[in-house]
Amino acid sequence: MRWVDIKKSLSEFWYDFRRQKSGLLGLLLLFLFIFTAVTAPVLTSPDIPQKWQGFWLDNPKNVPPTWINTLSSQSMAPHLTITGEELQKLITKTDSGYLIKVSYNNEYDIPPQDVVIKDLTGDASGGKLSISVMVERPDGRKITLLENYKFSGSIVLQLGSQPQVRDNLIKWAKEEGIYVDPLQEFQYKTLMDATKVIFGELNEDIFERPKPLTGTYTFTIIINVPEGSSASFENAKVIFTGRTYGKLGTDFKGRDILSGIIWGSRVSLVIGISVAVFSVIIGIFYGVTSAYLGGWSDEMMMRFQEFMASIPSLPILILMGAYFGGHIKLWQIVVLLVIFGWVGIARVARSMALQIKEQVYVEAARVLGAGTGRIIFRHMVPQLLPYAFAQMALSVPSAVLSEASLSYLGLGDPTAVTWGQILHDAQVAGAAVNGYWWWVIPPGLAIALVGLTFVLIGTALDRVLNPRLRRL
Amino acid sequence: MGFGRYLVIRLLNALVVLAIVTLVMSSLFVKVAEKDLENTIIQKVNAEFQSLQQQGRIPEDPDAWRAERIAHYRSQYHLDKSYWWRVQYYFRNTLTFNFGKTKNPVFGSEKDVMAILKVAIPRTIQLFTTAQIIIITLGILLGVKAAQMVGSFFDRALSILALVMSSIPMWWFGMIMLLIFSFKMGWFPSRAIPDPNLTGWPHIVDLLKRMTLPVATIVIVSFGAWAWVIRNIMIGTMQEDFIMAARAKGVPERKVIYGHALRAAAPPVVTMIIFSLLTSLGGAIITESVFTWPGMGRVYWIAIETNETNLIMGLTFVNVLLYLGGVILADVAYGFLDPRVKVGASENV
């Protein structure tokens, strides 16, 4: 084939394909998926697969996406982390240490879960450092939350669950003239949702049913550094742990589900496409060889094909999973899916090849002394290419589904971030029972969308490339 | 070649396949079970040793006693025999439905694999046959309708629906159904295991309530693709000469479609029905476990989770058996329904 011919047939193909609206939509979706998969490290961060299995300590657990606020009557505080340069700007040096002033505008019906001061490191060679936290509320009142809390090394200070903070809040409320039931006091000390009180209206109900007080809160963090000691703010963070997080919320480990979905697209595309390509190639060659050889070899090959077709694939895949020690690595999944994927294609390829075999030019080639390999490769397989391309696209969804199903059963590769794995975690953590819809719906939609993409492309290809099989 | 001979060859072929699949499974399983059994033996011996200790009858030479007990159990579990001996032992047992017992009881107190299967299979059939009947009815009705008005809005909508639905994982859709109708709305129970205290009419109502969500899930996910295939088959048949002839004769349109066209399209449809029933039995594994429906799939899941090798073996064998039986049934049905299918011709398809 000359280059000009290829160019011509390609442009003809494109001319036909362009008229298939569904095919174009599929192509668009495919580009979108490829773009997402390729740019995953940029869109999220490159270390997601490494840290996926661990707990994401900085994030809130099991919280819905932030945009949920636009749908519900109650607004919930989003996640806010102040770190790096942003934090450095808020730090001032004083005679005895440092002073950090953090303003937080609480305009939400449900305030943050917690206020965390994290990874502040102190070198205590000259004596321990101490930290005090004060807050000035929009109603003008000041509360000392923490006084002279001594520390060395790296600290994680969770104001919401710190006992001293609870004590100070009860003390402050009493000073403001709020009656605190002595019988209840102990309960408050152990169970109180401290942030709701910090961000709450000052009234008799502040402990029982705190109402949010909106406005700007200024947190003053004073760090006292004794002579000879030093403090480092390099990794320090101030976190207002949200009741909502990001575009798709978080799961039980605080993982950002959106990053998981984005990284999962890589696995899905790679597995789906490689399984489809390999199984179609094997199936075509198997079918063509079988048809060309004929006789006993054909008989044997078809018996083997029937044998493979008779094995119910999912149970055997599960069985193989158990054999591999409960977890199948990604490449093993690819191999297994290919082993079961070529069977149907071989059958159709054989029936098509039987027709091609009878054509004159094949016979002519044989008479001229062409070998079996040459006839199969050069004369018969190229005839089947259109069918092959359509089949490749159409086999992707089932491969993606199979991988997701295996992962969902807990047999997948635990070190990989895949949509099936996310759904598996969701099922184990009872996400449906607890109503964590943001954890269940997106991965499934993503799987369905990949399936739809390739079905659209496949049916369009089928219509363009196989006019003989053209469906109305 | 006569039909009888074709059937015999088909049966023999199926038996050979069954034998090979079982052999492959056995050789895999012997490997998996080996590690498992070794652990079980050590646990058993340790437990025995402890109970002896409590009774104050510690053996004189604990190491020798231990070795003796381990050897005893090893011979009991045939671990002292060669790998191939065990493979053929497993192979023979499986072929004769001698699946053995599970380590832990499944379904209450049942430990016998055969008895577990006898409880589970009818439940799976109950769920999936109900769903399949609805799917087939809906599929045929909608498919025929779409074929009647090719290119209309209805036809296009159906095609798109079929494409979208066939890309959705059934078990995921089940999770969504549970999320909405069970946990948010509270209309249906989330667990499908029936209440054992109910009998008579309340039992049936309870059962129907528990079946609604799984059946709805299966139907919604599958009927679109079905309707689409029926539509494609029907379009092909409607262009045949005998349909034209019937129309020309003035046969009413209803009768042309349901009497002539659908009847001619019956062979592939019946094959499809049989095959979809079969594949649903295999695919039920995840769907059933989502709804905790106590059928074959659920048992399969339990067996995997708790490493019950005997149970997995029995389930897989029964699955393969059902599948092969279905394939033969489909072939026979095809032969009966379509007289054109002569064996010699079908061999080359």
Image (cartoon, rainbow, N blue to C red):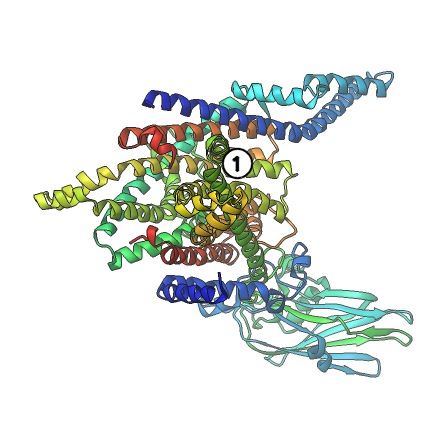
Horizontal side of A168 relative to B290 (left or right) equals right
Quarter location, residue B131: top left
At 67% from the left and 20% from the top, the residue drawn is B77
Above or below residue A196? Residue A141 is: below
Above or below residue B207? Residue B12 is: above
Q: Is residue A397 visible?
A: yes
Looking at the picture, tell me which residue is in the foreground, A35 or A340: A340
Split into 4 quadrants, where in the image is the N terminus of chain B?
top left
Check the residue under mark 1 and report the chain it is in. Answer: A
Split into 4 quadrants, where in the image is the C terminus of chain B?
top left
At 42% from the left and 49% from the top, the residue drawn is B177
Q: Amino acid at mark 1?
A: Pro
Q: Residue furthest front?
A: A368
Q: Is residue B207 visible?
A: no
Percent position of residue B332, x then y: 34, 28
Looking at the picture, tell me which residue is in the foreground, A198 or A463: A463
Percent position of residue A429, x then y: 57, 49
Q: Which residue is mark 1?
A: A315
Looking at the picture, tell me which residue is in the foreground, B27 or A107: B27
